[in-house]
Image (cartoon, grey):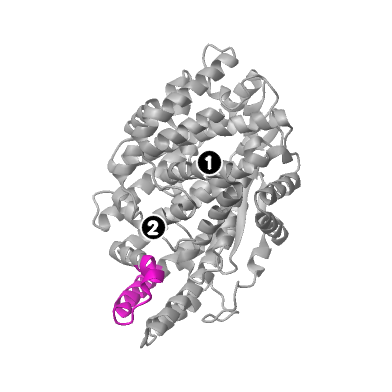
Amino acid sequence: MSIAGEHLKGFAPYQERHFLNINDNLGDWETIKKYYELLLNRLITTSLDMEQWVLDRSEMEAAIDQQSSILYILMTCQTDNEQRAKDYSRFIEEITPAMKPYEQNLDLFLLKNVQQYPLENTRYKLYIQKIRQDVELFRKENILLETEVDLLSQEYQSICGQMGVEFDGQEHTLPQMEKYLHEPDRDLRERAWRAISRKRLSVKDSLNKIFDRMLQLRDQIGRNSGFANYRDYKFKALHRFDYTPEDCRNYHAAIEKFVVPVWKKILYRRRLQMKLDALRPWDTSVDPLGRSPLKPFVEDHQLTEKCSKIFARVDDSLGYQFKEMSQWGMLDLESRKGKAPGGYQSTLNEARKPFIFMNAVGIDSDVRTLLHEGGHAFHALACSHDPLLDYRHAPMEFCEVASMSMELLGGEFLTEFYSSDELLRSKSEHWEDVIFILVWVAVIDSFQHWIYENPHHTNDQRIKIWKQIRSRFGAEAVDWSGFDEEHAYLWHKQLHIFEVPFYYIEYGIAQLGALQVWLNFRKDYKRAVGAYKQALALGGSRPLPELFQAAGIKFDFSEKTIKPLLDAVEKEL
C-alpha cells in the first residue's frame, strides 16, 4: 500500500447504488442534505415501502461513513500531513454536526411510520430497539460538545503520532523504541525505558489539558441527556442492553480475587529467573532467561506472507480473504514517524472492505496484533452480505471475540514464524499476556468508572486514585520507586481513555469468550471454527447472548466463568 493511500477512494460500491447517484460528492454538505430531505419527505403507504426506506437510508449512511473512514485512515497514517488533518477536521467540524439533527429526524420518522406499517419483527426488532434508544438520548445542545470532543481526540492523535525519541544517535518512533525493552542487556533496556518515559512526560501537561476538557464536555453531555453522570449515559449510548455497571464491578472483584494472584505468581517467577531483588518497569517484557528477543520477521512483507499462511491453516477461506486484502492495498503495517499510535481495523462500509492499520517493528507482539486485527477483518467480511449497515457491525463485546479468538487459533500455527523452542517461548509470553490483559482491563475500567462518577476531581486526586487502583490489582509486584511521576501518568498511553471512553471492558468480556472458543477448538477443530465463522456472519443482527451462543460459548464474565477458564490458562502456562 502506498503511504498516500489515495487508492482507498477508488473502490466501487459492494453493490450498485439504488438511492444515491454514483458521482455524488459526499464530502459536500448540500449534497448529503438533499438525500436526508428526500428520505424525510418520502410517502410511506405499505410495510414494503417502509423496508425500502430503511435500506435506502442504510445505503446513504454507509457511503457517508466510508467518506469519513477514509479521511480518518489517511489522517492517522500521516498525522504530520497538514492537508489530511484539515480534511478530517473539516468533516468532523462541518459535516458530522450538521448530520446529527437529520439523523434524529430520520429516527423519529421511522418510529412514527413503523407503527402503521410495521417491519418484520424477527429481522428488525433489535434495529428498532437501538433507534428508540438513540432517540431518547438525543439532545441538540450536545452536538457542538461532541464535535469539540472529536477535535480534541484528533489533537491527542497528532501529539502521540509525532512523538519521536532520540536514542543512541538515531530518532525512533515510540513503537520502534519498544524493541529495546526486549533486549537482554539490562542497562540498554533501562536507558530505553527512561527515554520513552521522558518523552511521554514531556507532553503530560498537554495531554492532561486535553483530557480535562474532554471530561468536562462529556460530563455535560451526560447531564444534558438527563443522567447523573457520563458513565450512565454512555452505557445507554453504547446499546449495552445485556449488562450493567454493577456487572463490571463484579468483574473487577473476580479479577482481584482469582486473576491477580496468578499475575503476581508470574511476576515472582520472573524475578527469580532473572535473579533480581526487585523487578523494575524495564524488566517486564524481556525474556526472563536472558535469551535474545524473538524476531519473527525482518521485512513487513514477511509478516504479511506468514500470517496469510497461518490464516489459511485455520481455515482456507480466511487465508484467501487475507490475500485479497493485501492485493487490494488494505494493509498499512510498518511503524514510521508521523503515524498515529496503536492498531485498528476500519471498514469502508460502502465497498464493504476492511482496512488494517498497525505499527509493526519486528517483535513477537506484532504477529499477535496482525492476527487480532485479521479477526476483525474476517468479521467485517463475514457479515458484508447484510444489506443493513447496522447489522454489518456487531457489538464490540463480540467484535473482540472475533479478534481475540483469532489470536488463540492462529497461535496454534506459529511454526510459520518459529522453531519449536521459539514457539514455546511465544506461546508462554502470550498466555502471560492473557493474564495481564484480564487484569489491565479491570484497572482501566475501574479507573474510568471513578473518573466519570467524580467528574470534578483534581489532578492530584486522579493520580491518587490511579495508584490505589493499580495497587488493588497487583502493581506492587513491580518496583516503581524513583519513578513516581512516570507511574502517575502511565494511563496517558491508553488511547481508549481519551478517544473511546468505556470501550475497554469489552476486551475482558471478549477474552473470556475467546478462551472458550479456543477450548472448543482443542476438542473439535472443525466444529469450533465452523461455529466461529457462523457467529461472525450474524454481524449485529442478534443480541449479545445469542451471538455468543452461536459461537458455542457463554456470554458471562462473572466469577463462575472466570475461575475454570483461569485454571485452563494456568495449565498451559
Name the spot of residue 116 as percent of width and height, x first: 29, 82
Q: Is residue 274 left or right of residue 214?
A: right
Q: Locate residue 353, reporting x and y percent.
A: 61, 63
Q: Amino acid at mark 1?
A: Leu
Within the magenta stretch, is there residue 125?
yes
Q: Quadrant of residue 421?
A: top right
**Is residue 453 something one can see in this rendering?**
yes
535 or 137, nearer to the observer: 535
Q: Characterize the magenta stretch by its predominant secondary structure.
A: helix
Residue at the spot 58% in from the left edge and 66% down from the top edge:
352
| Residue positioned 32% across, 38% down in the render | 250
Residue 82 appears in the picture as rendered: no
Q: Which residue is mark 1?
A: 519
**Badge 1: few (under 14), some or many (20 or more) residues near its Cα, within 10 Å?**
some
**Chain-order first, disc 2 or disc 1:** 2
> Picture coordinates of residue 319 (x, y %)?
69, 54
| Quadrant location, the N terminus | bottom right
Residue pictured at 60% horizontal, 44% vertical: 409
When the figure is inspected, residue 323 is found, relative to residue 9, above or below; the finding is above
Q: Is residue 389 left or right of residue 257?
A: right
Where's residue 129, x and y in %?
33, 65
Q: Which residues are magenta?
A: 100-128
Please state, as top left, top right, bottom left or bottom right, where the C terminus lies in the image.
top right
Tag 2 residue: 146
